Amino acid sequence: MMKRMMIKSNNKSNASYGRMSCGNSNTTSSSASRDDEFEWEMRPGGMLVQKRVGNSDGTAAVPNLRLRIAFGALQYEISVNSQATFGEVKKLLTAESGLQAGEQTLIFRGKERENGDYLDTCGVKDGSKLILIEDPTSIEKRFIEMRRNAKIQTVHRAISEVSMEIDKYAEQVSVIEKSISSGIKVPELQITTLIEMLMRQAIKLDNIPAQGDTSAQKNLQGKRVQKCVETLDGIKISNATLKPVIVTTKWETFNPNLPPTTANWEIFD
């Protein structure tokens, strides 16, 4: 009984729907004719919109928009496709603002727009104004990067100063080495003093907080100091076996009271 009642009810509903359809046949046909005039398309965001009329070659006729961009005290004007996204606008603004797309935030009608939002669906028209601001997160990242770069530059300068000192001492080591090779004894104090000065540079290098590339430069200078000290240690041993060179000069004395001697010259024909 319950099943029959449900069927009956459905029949009544269908009948009512049939009467409604008949009564609105003109309206329905009119709406259908209007729908036939337009084609519809589904946008990536899921919105059903009227399909744009295409050109004779089948491509969509898409107008360009002139947008005014306010970035602090600066003003930019760009031309962009009306069906472009805000993310594409950010790419165009990279060259103008110097900010990467990920560092930009675009505001339109008081609301931040996402990269995937389309200009036309958000109501952007020719001559519309957009506000560009730098993303606060990117500002913090850039500040941290600036501090990091400043530290690296400080380390570079410190290593460079030590390197110049090592250059000076390495030249002195070369001079002493040539003297020893020539058999000329060098004062031992000169060698020990030079070793001490090189060790001071090694201590300076140890106190430099280097990382990455600067660490490699620091190690390179440390090896230079080690090589110079090892060379001086070897020179010190060789120098100890050399005898000091004593230079004596015999002076010939003359008696100013004696007449000058004359030489006898023999004449030949």
Image: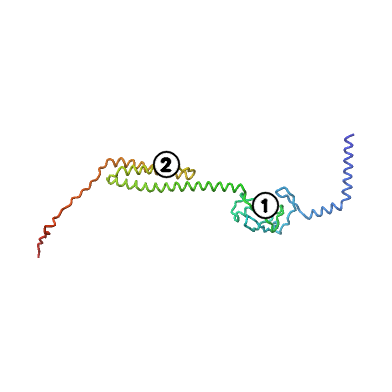
Q: Position of residue 83 (x, y in %)?
A: 69, 54
- The residue lying at 51 percent from left, 48 percent from top is 150
Residue 147: x %, y % from top left: 53, 47
Query: Where, quadrant-wise, is the N terminus in this rendering?
Result: top right
Which of the two discs, 2 and 1, sits closer to the camera? 2
The type of residue carrying mark 2 is: Ile
* Residue found at the very far bottom of the displayed protein: 269
Separation of marks 2 and 1 at Cα, in angstroms: 55 Å
Query: Left or right of 156: which side holds 14?
Result: right
Kind of residue at disc 1: Ile
Looking at the rendered structure, the secondary structure element under dot 2 is helix
Q: Nearer the viewer, residue 210 or 46?
A: 210
Q: Which residue is mark 1?
A: 107
Q: On the rendered image, what quadrant is the C terminus found in?
A: bottom left
User: Mark 2 or mark 1: which comes first in sequence?
Assistant: 1
Q: Is residue 109 left or right of residue 14?
A: left
Q: Position of residue 233 (x, y in %)?
A: 34, 40
Q: Which residue is more in the foreground, 246 or 55?
A: 246
Which residue is more in the foreground, 120 or 236? 236
**Apparent side of residue 211 relative to residue 199 in the rendered image (left or right):** right
Residue holding disc 2: 203
